[in-house]
Amino acid sequence: MRIQLLGSTVGDPTGYQFCMSYLINETIAIDAGSLGLQSPISVQQGVSHLLLSHAHLDHIATLPIWLDNVFEPSLQAPRIYASSSTWDFLQRHILNDSLWPNLERVAASEAPFYYPEILKPEQPVEIAGLTITPVDLDHLIPTFGFLIDDGQVAIALISDTSPTTRIWELCRQHPRLKAVFLEASFPNRMAWLAEKTKHLTPAMAFAELEKLGREDIPVYFVHLKPQHQVTMSHEVLSHQTQRPVIVVDPGHEYVISL
Ligand SMILES: [Zn+2]
Ligand SMILES: [Zn+2]
């Protein structure tokens, strides 16, 4: 399985994570924070399935732009998978004929811009050879983490969240789990802000990893706020642990294999 955190900077190759989108095996995207800004445009056109974790802007900011960029009536429209509450946010606040056209209305009798699919907690969906299971996290609005399994290896994407339990139970039991992509948003000195916004600091994230055990499984840190990236990278990489620890480099493709 190949996974890449898509870059969200322009003109500067530093690895800041302004907005969140992952690309998996080139055809599946998770979140659309930066998807609609990717160049060459063939990267955007190659995505036929998009799953959304939640409706916060750093995860959906370029969704309308991406849909506009890839729309071609003669081609199969992408499928977008999200919880019913995320769809509700999108329809009320984004695709509402004010901020952006209501694309389902626009395309009602023509070629669709997208096919909507509803994700339900712990009901796996089969997408392009992967089994993807959404799992409720604990964030300010309803948010899914994802377990992604290709039959040989599995990874967990756990972001955005405050301390949680269920996804760690599922990770602990998963026979093929090979990597956890975990959020840490604020440095340890800003635990108060992490708590109020339902995110994690590095110290909180390592406390979460205790729930996983299995210290052979690497943790890939994502969602570091850019102004704290240097401090947080130090906090993450200097933590005493046997577990391999990686700060994810946007634009780099990670190959997760046996
Ligand atoms: Zn969020
Ligand atoms: Zn976020």
Image (cartoon, rainbow, N blue to C red):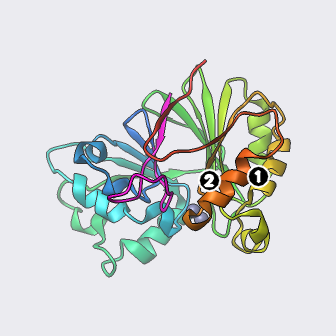
Q: Residues within 10 Å of mark 1 (few under 14, many from 20)?
A: many
- The C terminus - image quarter: top right
- For the record, the magenta segment spans 1-22
Which residue is tagged 1?
205
Q: Secondary structure at mark 2?
A: strand
Q: Left or right of 246: which side holds 235?
A: right
Q: Left or right of 105: which side holds 1?
A: right
- Mostly what secondary structure, the magenta segment? loop
Residue 218: x and y in percent read 69, 33
Which residue is tagged 2?
144
Would you place residue 227 above or below residue 120 in this image?
A: below
Question: What type is the residue that disc 2 sits on?
Answer: Phe
Would you place residue 12 above or below residue 74 in this image?
A: below
Q: Residue at x 72, y 30 (%)?
A: 217
Q: Secondary structure at mark 1?
A: helix
Q: Residue at x 24, y 42 (%)?
A: 42
Residue 149: x and y in percent read 58, 30
